[in-house]
Image (cartoon, rainbow, N blue to C red):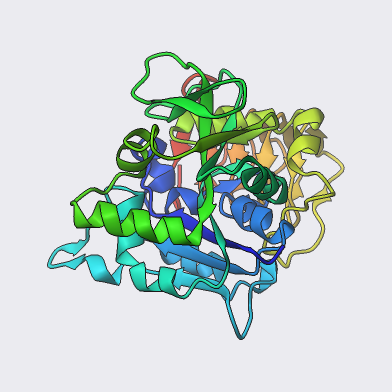
Amino acid sequence: MNGLHGIIFSYEQRSGLKELSAIRSAASLPFAGRYRAVDFPLSNLVNAGVTDVGVVLNGHYQSMLDHLGSGKVWDLSRKRGGLKILPPFNYQKDWGVMPFRGKIEALAGVRSYLDNIRQDYVVLMDGDLVANLPLADVLEQHIASGADISMVCANDSFFIEDGTYFEKDGSGRVTEVLYHLQTPRGYRSLETYVLSTKLLKELVDECHGKGQYSWRQDVLLAKKDVLHEQCYVWTGFATQMRTVKEYYDRSMQLLDPVIRRDLFTPERPIRAKGADKASTYVGESGRCVNALVAEGCRIEGVVENSILFPGVVVEAGAEVRNCVLFKETAVRRGAQLQYIIADKNVEILADRTLIGHESYPIVLAKGSKV
């Protein structure tokens, strides 16, 4: 499928993620032991045969640049097309980079890039969407239905604050666009939209010329009765983590093998950078129960119901339960952790006890020593 071009938005700063988003955008948030959130939309695109992808950046994007590199991991390092980084140079102010107010404003900032898109269709995706979407099927339905815009949505009760929800008729056509809901209703938007390249450029020019910047309000809602907007309902695992609690809950769901099989299906593999580390070592006194453990870890204590990223050390006598530990975290001898999210290079000193709660996990900032 050479008729689809990918644009990923990696500019959202999620204040609800607290320390986890202090040094990175939501799209570069580590997830599932060895991945970043952006690995999922990139892999979705590549699995659908997409060869040209633009990534729109804004604020705290050094982590994203380091992760993406040339795009070789996703087979997007090419002489023509491939991965293109779109930094926010047009939005430089005296005090730094101002955040985009919406997708239309972000696209207007890279308007010249849109003119160079070779494909007939474009898919817009948020960089922090964790899902394994069959985008080839989405495009096929989009063309068959004659829709102007197709949006991928989920039929579940998972509520996202300030999320977008759709109601549709029996044919799948959108009848209502809803947001600022207190309780979920209709179908939850996965912020994935397919439309023609021609229509995208027309919408960006029209909205930008009127001082409009919101894709949700100025396109989806305002043009609901003018454009044919169609739903593609996805029933598999899908999430965008907006808060620490959401991140923790969705991470813990991965301990369920049924969820893992749904997200990491062999038909559509998720690609990620390797950690270049040796195999994980579990010592004679070490014990792992119901845990996701990446390569390069050294476990001589107890790990239960937890997710460990590459290079984590759990020394003898230490106990780690119901935790998410990022790269190179060290839990020293005799320490006890429960309901903790530790960022990269955190050290928990010997005999320390840190206990959060399932409803309020404790976040340890990058490089902290406790």
* Residue furthest out toward the right: 284
On-image quarter of the C terminus: top left
Residue 69 falls left or right of residue 131: left
Residue 198 falls left or right of residue 328: left
Q: Is residue 103 above or below residue 59?
A: above
Q: Is residue 26 above or below residue 307?
A: below
Residue sitting at 36 percent across and 47 percent down? Answer: 13
Q: Position of residue 334 (x, y in %)?
A: 63, 35
- From where the camera sits, is residue 332 visible? no
Q: Quadrant of residue 46?
A: bottom right
Q: Is residue 190 above or below residue 71?
A: above
* Residue furthest out toward the left: 94
Residue 219 falls left or right of residue 82: left
Residue sitting at 43 percent across and 40 percent down? Answer: 227
| Nearest to the observer: residue 322 or residue 116 | 116
Q: Position of residue 366 (x, y in %)?
A: 45, 51
